[in-house]
Amino acid sequence: MSTNASAIENIQGIGRPWMEVLHEWVTTVDHKGLGLLYILYALSYLVIGGFEALIIRAQLMHAHNHLVSPQVFNRMFTMHGTTMIFFVAMPMLFGFANYLVPLMIGARDMAFPRLNAFSFWLTALGGGLLYFSFLGGNGLYGAGTAPDVGWWAYAPLPAKAFSPGHSSDYWTIALLVSGLGSVGTAINILTTVLCMRCPGMHLGRMPLLVWLNLVMSGMVLIAVTPLTAAQVMLLVDRYLGGHFFDTQAGGSATLWMHFFWIFGHPEVYILILPAFAFVSEIVPVYSRKPIFGYPVMVGATVFIGFVSMSVWAHHMFTVGMNSYANSFFTITSMVVGIPTGIKIFNWIGTMWGGRIRFKTPMLFCLGFLFQFLVAGLTGIMLASSPFDWQLGNSYFVVAHFHYVIVGGLLFAIFAAFYYWYPKFTGRMLSEQLGKVHFWLFLIGFHATFDVMHIPGILGMPRRIYTYEPGRGWDTLNLIVTIGAVIQAAAILVFVCNLAVSYWKGANAGKDPWDAWTLEWSATSPPPAYNFATIPVVASRRPLWDLKHPEDPDSRYE
Amino acid sequence: MQGYLIASSTNILAPASTPARTIFGLSLFVLGITALIFVVVAGLMVYSVVKFRARATDAAREPAQVCGSTQIELAWTVIPALIVAVLFLATARVIHAIQDTPKPAAALDVIVVGHQFWWEFRYPKLGIVTANELHIPASDRARPTPTFLKLTSADTDHSFWVPELGGKTDLIPNRVNQMWLDPPRPGIYLGQCAQYCGTQHAKMLLRVVVERPADFGAWVSAQQQAAIQDARVSAGKRVFETNVCINCHAVSGTAADGRFGPDLGHLMSRATLASGAAENTPSNLRLWIQTPDAIKPGSLMPAMKLSDADLDAVTAYLETLR
């Protein structure tokens, strides 16, 4: 255990000058250091984006509220959406991928460590630029600060005529820069997975987490590039007299929509595939069974990857496409439900016949399963385009995608935190605080997002800073706001848990969960080189084979 | 306008026009199927969590290591595929029924132009231009007189949404979209802009006044009259005509022919000001001219900075524009 203890001291920098520790963090090219940087970066933006959500909810607490001006409100929802997608969800998932993928394939680092650092610092610069707009930009109203064009920035709102200052430029450049970072990381993950696997780990033996991140990275390459291209075109419009999206000079507003959603919908799967990845690793360990239907899970993932590239215009059912286009995007959107459904069934199949242990990571996975089911079903409703003509751009849609992003993705991320924190730090997170966090967050989540569907059905559109009384929206919005406060309290418990456990948590050891993938064979935290000798694997669960020499998986594969 | 019920809700589950009703029928079907899926799958989840929880007695042993089953995988691929096929066919039928309906000869044409942050309604065959309150005739089942809207935008994207009458359709610059309504019951139906269009997106409210054919005819002939010229308010008219009001607003028979703001020729026939942000009362009208931000902060109507006397005069003039 002595090596383990010294490893903890090393990462906590005990007894070393803080400048030296800081210098090490800033210059690191180690995949674990960069993974943690990504995660910490995303966590701080999660808190900032959460504050913005609380301001939005406080304003909508009751009808005709005057807490903030429409200008401030519009900035808040723009910044909240942009922050949560580009500077929380993406870096958080890249962080986990960075940390875990090399460990799980028995590699000593990513394929391109310097590109890795470059990508992280580009993403960091992007977030910094976005928030610098509070000081440096002017909004739609001329006197504003942060961008207020919505996180889609539908043309022609970001055109010079409607966004005279620099606020939307900060938005554009922030996304451009962080988009380049995402592409760099995607190339890195792809190369690492394809070229750096340890002996014996052919594609059919890769942990599902690695498979899902492989598909995710391929999708990032295809989906983020059109967004980057569109940002360049927007800059050309604004500064070089281009007319791509400038409707006052004959440009096309729908062209921007197509560019944005060709990025935007695959993006949803880019975010949710890593969530699937966490669940696919955690559910088997706490059910004490291998994942059910591994080849089918891989096939379903690849299928999602392809089909999700042809569903983007379901965000555009109301822009006046003809009935054939509407029908096409209806069927493709519904078809995505099939592989997704297969995944849910396979997770249930994994639990079936197992011996389920309800540790905090498993609780969050169960929350994920339930909420992702609901999100999928409301997604089917929205895929039915005439139903979408009513529900689209209403609070029903807001509730739906928060069900996916919070109820699905964030729950899976919390599960991943509780599951891999011992590996990252060598300390266990507190189970007691973890359970308080889980139940508080679950209650807050359902108070907020279950109720939020109803104002949408009652005709409340999104992105309005205030609303008329007497439409049945008031009480519902109050409950939604209370739920948001409960969620904020849960996040506070989580952050306390992260901080307290870092210093006071029980020693984790190599393998606290009795798990089966390679990262648990390294010390916690792993040394810079990960493995003293490169492991050789003979099945999908190398540690199972080690622990059960009498009945190894390798006998059946 | 008296005698019409103002719809107190904007509930998509209370359809009052054929497109809304067709969508409502499809919604019930989709809701039914998804509810069924929810009960089955959530039931399986709860069952497996309860049934297969670790118990103190067997915690030490590992369960049977089952890796999968081709038959089961096949079953839970084929069944969802069949459900998707059914849902798609039901949906495609409704898409076709709403989008590809031919326009009958008796249909009323209205051009809807979205502006930051108000609605312009033009009746090309009737020579009427009005704002924010769309008047249409009730449509009889036996002799339907639906209203066909052509929608476009003068500036940013907007979306026309009156939930009880139909789904939303976007108003996009350089593009003409179409939708139709045929509410049989007279009444006032509420809605609002459903595509973020800038600072005051929230107060780009919308109402559709559905009238019995005779009432609609009376409204049409009143709107077709030239604006009233009343000598008693000539002072106010002069204030109106000698200020920048006329750059944006139009009043027939005067120098005012602006297109940037709503036509004011029959301002007092409307129940609301500032696209539904305030009731159309003399005191609100005066406040709106004096400090628009008090009613709708961020609207594009500038504060006119008139003297009290001019303000009273121009308000008195506008109040004669029935």
Image (cartoon, coloured by chain):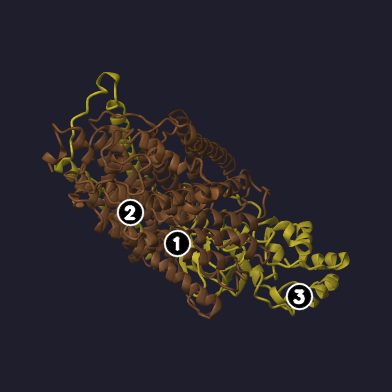
Please give the name of the residue rendered at 61% of the width and 72% of the height, measured from the top-left corner: B128
Foreground residue among B133 and A64 = A64
A337 sits left or right of B146 in the view: left
Please give the name of the residue rendered at 46% of the width and 51% of the height, measured from the top-left corner: A37
| Badge number at residue B143 | 1
- Same subunit under labels 3 and 2? no
Spatial distance from mark 3 to mark 1, Cα to Cα?
A: 47 Å
| Badge number at residue A374 | none
- Same subunit under labels 3 and 1? yes
Spatial distance from mark 1 to mark 2, Cα to Cα?
A: 75 Å
Please give the name of the residue rendered at 32% of the width and 47% of the height, measured from the top-left corner: A530
Q: Could you say where residue A219 lies in the image, as x and y percent from the top left?
A: 33, 60
Q: Secondary structure at mark 3?
A: loop
Tell me what hue chain B is rendered in.
Answer: yellow
- In primary-sequence order, the first of circles 3 and 1 is 1
Q: Secondary structure at mark 2?
A: loop
**Residue annotated with mark 3:** B244
Q: Is residue A88 above or below residue A231?
A: above
Mark 2 belongs to which amino acid? Asp
10 Å neighbourhood of mark 1: few (<14), some, or many (≥20)? few
Foreground residue among A5 and A466 = A5
